[in-house]
Image (spheres, helix red, strand yellow):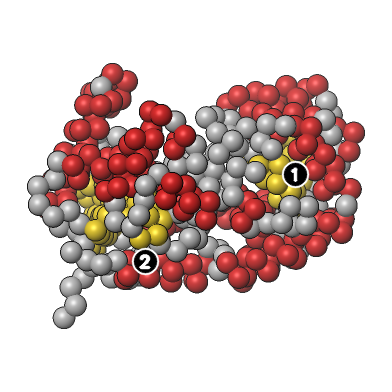
Amino acid sequence: MTKKKTILFVAMPDSIHTARWLAQLNDQGWDIHLFPSTLIPVLHPYISQLTVHYFFHNRRVLDADSPRHPIIKWCERAFYSLLRRNFSQFLLVWQAKNLEKVIERVQPDIVHSLEIQHAGYLTLTAKMQFKGRFPAWIVTNWGSDIFLFGKMPEHQAKIRQVLAECDYYACECQRDVQLAKTLGFSKIVLPVFPNTGGFDLLSLEKIRVQQATSERRVIMLKGYQHFAGRALLGLQALALCTDVLQGYTILIYSASPSVVRAAQLLRQQTDMVIQIIPQATNHETMLAFHATARLSIGLSISDAISTSLLEAMVMGSFPIQSCTACADEWIEHGVSGAIVPAEEPKIVAMWIRKALSDDDLVNRAAQLNWQTALARLDGEALKQQAIAIYNAVELR
């Protein structure tokens, strides 16, 4: 009788990316465990069929109705907050010690770190102090983990350590494969495909074809404004196009507080119609919004393949994406989308105008991107690729 495969994930438990990746494995009959890479975790509602190891206890999560978070007293929350502010290095060692104990107790066949700066560093620390043979270790690169942080002296040495100690490396971009090799990775590179899985294309086609792209009167803007996101520059670009935006509604999603304030001010100063999509909006609703959009804008100084870019492609919205997100591995500039500098609003504005004035361009792009989706984003096909990863890992 074949032994049931046991996999321990180290990941952000409240992340939709974690949830979507894990959901692909629910029907495999494997023994799945999750160790949170962040303190005081709240479990994403999509996560089920696993055991989550909170810091003082574990809990089997069977379905969507299972408790989403541990019962933590207010004094414990205050204690964790104090640790995060003043004892980050101590906190990493303490978390790693707990992770080490979980590995000793669970004895997983595979440890898989989803993301590097939290999960990867945490797993590295646990491995360095682990007594005995460490399980096969997969590291998945998210977003800016290597493309941005790999350029920072305070992170570069740690990233090199992670890449030296792990056994398998996974990422979304061919660009990041080369960067990992430049940083010293010399072991097994896993197949390159999106970290968030694929889409139910048959269901989504019924939504996307309800309105031709050229007939749509919505513009989507990704609202991240942080270490990488540049949504404020997207708003500046839109402000340069006020004369051609009559009749259009601008929808901003995942909006940072500064973006909400800037959007409110821009709405007061112009006659632009701007709406903020609530943060808690589910994935299905977001896809439906993209299906009403003529174009979708995403700007950042660093990313892997942006999930919002893929959503725009699948739903027929013309993507305008910054050149820092390996968009060139998915769309052809000027044909199936526009690849633009993240911090030059005049160039972004030029492509907004082009997408609003050229019906043939946006309709043709929608057709091309749908063919790409059929070839590369089918949910069942990507699920099978994800499962194949764990079946291919050489167990110890």
Q: Are the two marked residues, 1 and 2, in contact with CB atoms closer than 8 angstroms?
A: no
On screen, residue 305 above or below 394: above
* The furthest residue to the bottom: 1
Q: Residue at x 13, y 55 (%)?
A: 133
Q: Residue at x 28, y 70 (%)?
A: 29
On-image quarter of the C terminus: bottom left
Query: Is 272 left, or right, of 161 in this rendering?
Result: right
Residue under label 1? 219
Disc 2 residue type?
Ile
On screen, residue 64 above or below 323: below
SS category of the residue bearing label 1: strand
SS category of the residue bearing label 2: helix
x, y percent for residue 83: 26, 23
Res 245 → quadrant: top right
x, y percent for residue 119: 32, 43
Disc 1 residue type?
Ile
